[in-house]
Image: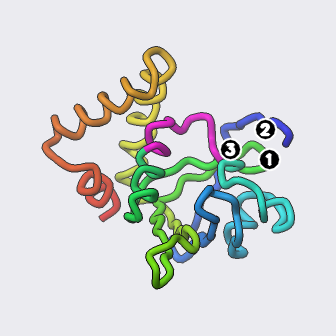
């Protein structure tokens, strides 16, 4: 896989666009709708079978993905703000809902994600918070970033979920 150099060019979803994708339980892409393919800049063939992390922007703190995977492994859904990297180096922000699809025996079939345009309010908060978390990770590790996130939430008197939901609504 080629290394992509991030640029400052931002792409944005319209309020009526949704990105939909499915991955296996390890994060390998099984399906992506036309909006997903278009905004990412990849062809369907380039995406299918690849790890979803192909879109991971270097501005994203690892703690966000640790939280995401912890929730999914516990078969719980999660909402998160994510900055994704496009094939051409541009980026786009999404408000993501990721859920686990289970069979009748409670076994994971796939992971299903629906992403939409994040609220203006969230974009006034999340880039700065993520920059602080990322800086903490670089200097002191993911554990320190997790402590910073938890302290930030505690200082605001909210749970992670309430924080995320309140920014979107």
Q: State the image coordinates of residue 14 (x, y, percent, origin top left).
A: 56, 69
The answer to whether the residues at label 1 and label 2 have Cβ atoms under 8 Å apart is yes
Callout 1: helix, strand or loop?
A: loop
Res 88 label: 1
Q: CA distance from mark 3 to mark 1?
A: 9 Å
Identify the disc placed on residue 4. Answer: 2
> Of 79 and 25, which appears nearest the observer?
25
Question: Magenta stretch containing residue 60, yes or no?
Answer: yes
Which one is earlier in the sequence, the residue at label 1 or at label 2?
Answer: 2
Would you identify the image quadrant in which residue 72 lies? Answer: bottom left
Near mark 2 (Cα within 10 A), the count class, few <14, some 14-19 or many ≥20, is: some
Q: How many marks?
A: 3
Quickly name the residue at label 3. Answer: 9
Q: From the image, state whether disc 3 or disc 1 is nearer to you.
A: 1
Is 162 situated left or right of 97 in this image? left
- Is mark 3 in CB contact (under 8 Å) with mark 1? yes
| Residue for point 70% across, 53% down | 51
């Amino acid at each position: 896989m080629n290394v992509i150099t991030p640029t400052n060019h931002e792409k944005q979803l319209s309020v009526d666009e949704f990105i939909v994708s499915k991955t296996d339980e390890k994060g390998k892409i099984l399906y992506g709708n036309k909006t997903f393919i278009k905004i990412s800049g990849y062809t369907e063939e380039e995406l299918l079978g690849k790890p979803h992390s192909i879109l991971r922007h270097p501005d994203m703190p690892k703690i966000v993905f640790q939280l995401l995977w912890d929730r999914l492994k516990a078969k719980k859904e999660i909402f998160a703000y994510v900055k994704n990297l496009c094939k051409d180096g541009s980026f786009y922000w999404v408000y993501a809902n990721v859920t686990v699809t289970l069979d009748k025996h409670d076994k994971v079939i796939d992971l299903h994600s629906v992403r939409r345009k994040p609220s203006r309010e969230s974009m006034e908060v999340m880039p700065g918070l993520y920059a602080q978390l990322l800086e903490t990770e670089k200097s002191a590790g993911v554990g320190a970033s997790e402590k910073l996130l938890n302290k930030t939430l505690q200082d605001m008197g909210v749970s992670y979920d309430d924080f995320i939901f309140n920014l979107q609504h």
